[in-house]
Image (spheres, grey):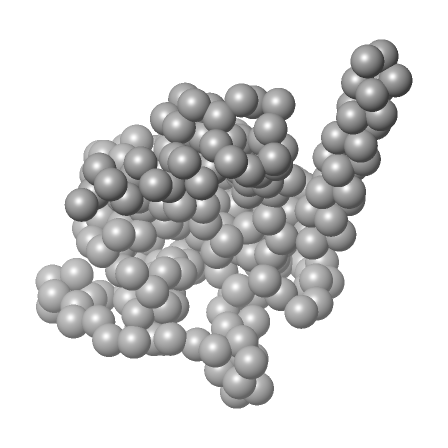
Amino acid sequence: MIKRALSYEKEVYQGLEKIFTMSEYLKRSFCEDIGIDEKKIACIGCGINLDEIPDEVDKDYEKKNILFIGRDFVRKGGEQILRAFKIVREKFTNARLFIIGPRELNLPRELSSGVVFLGFLSKNDPTQGEVFRRTLQESSLFVMPSLYEPFGIAPLEAMVNQIPCILTNGWAFPEMVRPGFNGELVECGDTNDLPEKMLSLLSSPSRLKEMGSAGRKLVLENYTWDTVVAKLVSALRQDVQDVAVNVASA
């Protein structure tokens, strides 16, 4: 059944004239895993899911507030961050970990200290949306050590709110985070490196501030829907020009 599904999917992709991807990672996958001609693929990115771009603010990076967002707690690396946060709390007893996304979460007692579970928050609900925005404003570091990730919008929304990110070194994440520039990357499932990098960044508020500004700039330049549409139009125009040249030379 799986082979038939994959075969049909490949047949569909092979019959398309143009494929637009959200990341270079996905573009490579189409080429290497499915055998699509690179000329048929254009990476145009993806925009953040916010109605309005938040204003730049003077964040207090002295606060040891860490943010995790993800409905699928396990797949997004929730268990890894809980264990890492326990180590962080041994040094920073005032550290807090905000968890947004899961509707329910059974926290082990030994890993619950300092954890603030906010559950699922709808941006469209005025009250919940305000809690979501305030939590972003209060957070100094975003951590999502995913075990698998198709793309990942939450880190981008964190970055536009001037929050440096620690993400898994895989999939599209290396396109979003440049280590030492706007955050750090950790290897998938590495429970030793994660707390070390969390502690390192939280120990330097000035570094967090620089990374926060760099991350916001990266998102505004690359991950808004205006940028996506501009790349889409550019790719289509290039195709039209290529067709015109081929027709003229025929």
Observer-nearest residue: 76 or 198? 76
Residue 62 against residue 164 in the figure, above or below: below
Q: Quadrant of residue 199?
A: top left
Q: Name the outermost residue toward the front.
A: 250
Q: In percent of the image, x 55 and y 38: which residue is there?
A: 16
- Along the line of sight, which residue is nearer the eye, 142 or 122? 122
Q: Position of residue 70 (x, y in %)?
A: 36, 61
Coordinates of residue 101 in the picture (x, y in percent)? 36, 68
Give whichever of 51, 187 is nearer the camera.
51
Q: Measuring from the top left, give residue 213's x and y in whole percent.
A: 66, 45
Q: Residue furthest right?
A: 248
Q: Is residue 172 visible?
A: no
Q: Is residue 105 left or right of residue 125?
A: left
Q: Is residue 224 left or right of residue 34?
A: right
Q: Is residue 24 visible?
A: yes
Q: Is residue 104 above or below residue 242?
A: below
Q: Position of residue 21 (x, y in %)?
A: 55, 40
Quarter-of-image position of residue 108: bottom left
Image quarter (top left, top right, bottom left or bottom right) of the N terminus: top left
Taking the spot 69% from the left edge, 47% from the top edge, the residue there is 228
**In the image, farthest residue toward the top:** 249
Quadrant location of the C terminus in the rendered image? top right
